[in-house]
Image (cartoon, coloured by chain):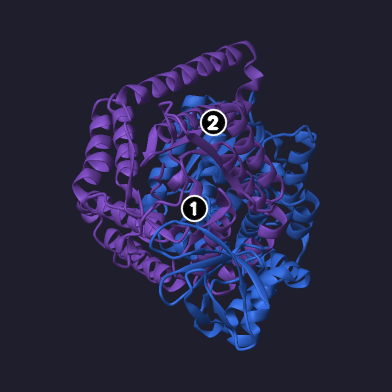
């Protein structure tokens, strides 16, 4: 058999083009008149059609691109460690490549959908409540600066009535959070809405209170927000979001800013998915509380429906878009399971 | 990614007679590399990261082996086990750091200071390992940089540039490139480059001018069309990349064009806008394919860099002489990678 190759003696960079005659026993003579047998050669792994380097015992080397012939010689004269061949087979057969794509996509999807939420839940539950305090203060300051909210126009008596029920609600929680209720006007910005900061600060807008037909609905909203805090949803979201760039970096092997941007799209998709799960969890929390106190949770359902029609599908704020379909939520709240 | 083009690519100034241009070429194909890449990723996931050492070797072997200069290919000779050991130690060190900091946060700063002193050592080891495992025509590259110079170039000067509001930064960049090139050798033949700090200052000044003028442009857009405000980051990104690409391209060109290897010289003809286009379109396509186009993007970059690089060969490339040196361990390189250090010509 004839193998076309470049020969380098390893002492200098001189290149000698040669055609090696390999006899039936695997012996061949190099241009420097030294004779070796194929069994003494260490052959670099096959990677696609990358050229191969044949390492000879005296430090000289052959470079050749006749991959198929080299593979044949290896099989004939010295079986390579099997792993080399296996990897090349995996990389060269379409069905294995397809399987690799499927496994990779599924594994990453599973990790994003199940692994990361479970991990960040574990971490979030262990973080001391003081950390959330700081996060909450920062957010409140941001709201002030951005002028998203104005001072509440609600009469004091109404505020006091709601506060009383709120205090009863939070007194029942065994966690370390320091709950505070803030009334705000958001007529020009986000309208009827309520939000919970990780610290236990809960904001409710005048517009939402006006929209409620029954005081129990407002209590339902507050219980829902307390549910977010108790389950540490904000922290979990923060922890989860910060994981994605890491994953993208691990897969693409790229640490530049590009990957951060690359991570943005899937992050947004997955976050919407998570936040729906969180809303459901908070709804259940509210429902449980209301049932325990003999309050009809359908009040909250009706308020949700009213919020949706008030928003009128004109792309109003995140409250609705990141929440599960309102119909499903209303149904959940109306169901009378024990 | 460290393409072999990098380590070699070094540039050529003066016009000496009898120089023959010999082009660097990259022969890799996206379709072929995709298969290697996806198997790498898949096996890395299945083995919980252990396979990543093999993945790295196969990837480098693919890129080196598909890069040629004058029809001879480059070779990457690192062993996966060396790299795995380095990775495990780096990972262990990182976990230890996390543990210590979470238990005694007060130790965070002293540890960072110690790290600043260790980092130059990591960089030196990393360069040694990378060069030792790069061959061309069966002659190894080598690296002779020492700890003190690395400490100055990578720790003292960057700290100094932070204290002087960046005034020293181009000088630091110059010292780094000088250190990298002038301590590299091919066999017994050293690389050399007379890099002047002034040239780095003009590159960075031009970059600042670029940044300021685009900044003003966007400030004006922001004022005249306030509704664009939320989209601003989206528009700013290409200009951030423009500045990045400008610096990258000009520093590479200047370094390569001034480098010499014995009688031989080098030439780099990268241009900001084509480079930016490759970088930016790669990113868009990677986002749209959820990362599956990564191999294609890597191949494009390697091809562009090879296409832009030429060696000006005096006579022929047959005269280099091998040097004997000890085996290098992978610890430095892997620590460098885990800790996200980026350096290279």
Tint applied to chain A in the drawing: blue
Name the image quarter holding the N terminus of chain A.
bottom right
Chain assigned purple: B
Q: Does B171 sit left or right of A318 as displayed?
A: left
Residue B12 visible within the image: yes
Residue receiving disc 2 = B269
- Element at badge 1? helix
Crowding near the residue tagged with mark 2, few <14, some 14–19, many ≥20 C-alpha atoms within 10 Å: some
Q: Between marks 1 and 2, how big is the CA–CA gap?
A: 49 Å
Q: Is residue A321 above or below residue A233?
A: above
Whole-percent x and y of residue A187? 64, 25
- Element at badge 2? loop
Viewer-nearest residue: A132 or A262: A262
**Callout 1: residue from which chain?**
A
Residue most extreme to the bottom: A25
Viewer-nearest residue: B250 or A320: B250
Whole-percent x and y of residue B216? 52, 14
Whole-percent x and y of residue A131? 38, 50
Question: Can you tell which of label 1 and label 2 is closer to the viewer?
Answer: 2
Residue B35 appears in which quarter of the rendering?
A: bottom right
Are callouts 1 and 2 both on one chain? Answer: no
Whole-percent x and y of residue B28? 65, 53
Q: Does A232 sit left or right of B118 as displayed?
A: right
- Which of the numbered marks, if any, corresponds to residue A33? none
Counting labels gives 2
Crowding near the residue tagged with mark 1, few <14, some 14–19, many ≥20 C-alpha atoms within 10 Å: many
Residue receiving disc 1 = A235
Residue B153 appears in which quarter of the rendering?
A: top left
């Amino acid at each position: 058999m004839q193998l076309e190759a470049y020969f380098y003696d390893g002492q200098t960079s001189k290149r000698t083009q040669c055609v090696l005659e390999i006899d039936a026993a695997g012996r061949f003579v190099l241009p420097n008149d030294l004779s070796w047998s194929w069994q003494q050669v260490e052959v670099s792994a096959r990677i696609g059609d990358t050229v191969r380097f044949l390492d000879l015992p005296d430090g000289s080397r052959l470079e050749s691109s006749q991959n198929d012939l080299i593979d044949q010689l290896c099989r004939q004269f010295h079986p390579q460690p099997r792993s080399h061949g296996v990897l090349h087979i995996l990389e060269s057969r379409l069905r294995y490549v397809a399987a690799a794509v499927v496994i990779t996509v599924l594994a990453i999807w599973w990790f994003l959908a199940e692994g990361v939420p479970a991990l960040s839940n574990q971490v979030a539950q262990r973080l001391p409540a003081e950390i959330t305090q700081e996060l909450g203060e920062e957010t409140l300051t941001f709201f002030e600066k951005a002028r998203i909210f104005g001072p509440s126009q609600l009469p004091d008596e109404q505020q006091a009535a709601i506060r009383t029920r709120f205090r009863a609600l939070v007194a029942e929680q065994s966690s370390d959070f320091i709950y505070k209720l803030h009334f705000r006007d958001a007529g020009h910005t986000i309208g009827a809405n309520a939000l919970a900061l990780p610290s236990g600060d809960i904001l409710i807008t005048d517009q939402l209170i006006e929209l409620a037909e029954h005081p129990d609905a407002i209590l339902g909203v507050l219980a829902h927000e307390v549910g977010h805090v108790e389950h540490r949803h904000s922290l979990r979201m923060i922890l989860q979001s910060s994981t994605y760039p890491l994953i993208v970096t691990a897969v693409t092997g790229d640490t530049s800013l590009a990957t951060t941007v690359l991570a943005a799209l899937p992050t947004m998709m997955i976050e919407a998915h998570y936040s729906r799960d969180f809303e459901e969890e908070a709804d259940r929390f509210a429902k449980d509380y209301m049932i325990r106190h003999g309050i009809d949770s359908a009040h909250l359902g009706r308020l949700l429906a009213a919020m949706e029609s008030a928003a009128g599908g004109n792309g109003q704020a995140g409250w609705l878009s990141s929440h599960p379909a309102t119909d499903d939520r209303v149904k959940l709240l109306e169901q009378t399971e024990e | 990614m460290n393409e072999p083009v990098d380590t070699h690519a070094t540039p050529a100034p003066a016009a000496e007679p009898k120089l023959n241009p010999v082009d660097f070429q990259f022969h890799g194909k996206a379709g072929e590399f995709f298969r290697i890449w996806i198997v790498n990723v898949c096996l890395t996931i299945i083995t919980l990261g252990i396979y990543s050492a093999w993945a790295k070797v196969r990837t480098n072997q693919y890129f080196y082996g598909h890069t040629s200069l004058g029809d001879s290919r480059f070779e990457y000779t690192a062993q996966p086990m060396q790299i795995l050991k380095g990775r495990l130690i780096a990972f262990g060190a990182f976990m230890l750091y996390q543990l210590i900091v979470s238990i005694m946060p007060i130790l965070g700063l002293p540890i960072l200071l110690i790290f600043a002193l260790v980092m130059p050592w990591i960089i030196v080891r990393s360069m040694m390992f990378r060069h030792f495992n790069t061959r061309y025509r069966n002659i190894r590259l080598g690296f002779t940089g020492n700890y003190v110079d690395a400490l100055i170039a990578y720790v003292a000067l960057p700290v100094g540039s932070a204290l002087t509001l960046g005034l020293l930064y181009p000088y630091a960049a110059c010292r780094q490139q000088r250190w990298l090139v002038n301590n590299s050798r091919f066999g017994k033949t050293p690389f050399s480059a007379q890099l002047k700090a002034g040239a780095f200052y003009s590159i960075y000044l031009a970059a600042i001018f670029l940044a300021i003028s685009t900044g003003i442009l966007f400030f004006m857009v922001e004022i005249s069309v306030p509704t664009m405000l939320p989209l601003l980051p989206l528009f700013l990104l290409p200009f951030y990349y423009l500045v990045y690409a400008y610096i990258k391209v000009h520093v590479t060109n200047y370094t390569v064009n001034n480098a010499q290897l014995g009688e031989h010289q080098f030439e780099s003809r990268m241009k900001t806008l084509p480079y930016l286009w490759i970088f930016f379109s790669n990113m868009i396509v990677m986002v749209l394919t959820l990362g599956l186009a990564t191999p294609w993007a890597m191949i494009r970059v390697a091809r562009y860099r090879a296409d832009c690089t030429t060696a000006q060969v005096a006579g022929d490339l047959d005269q280099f002489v091998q040097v004997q040196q000890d085996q290098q361990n992978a610890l430095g390189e892997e620590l460098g990678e885990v800790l996200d250090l980026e350096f290279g010509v």
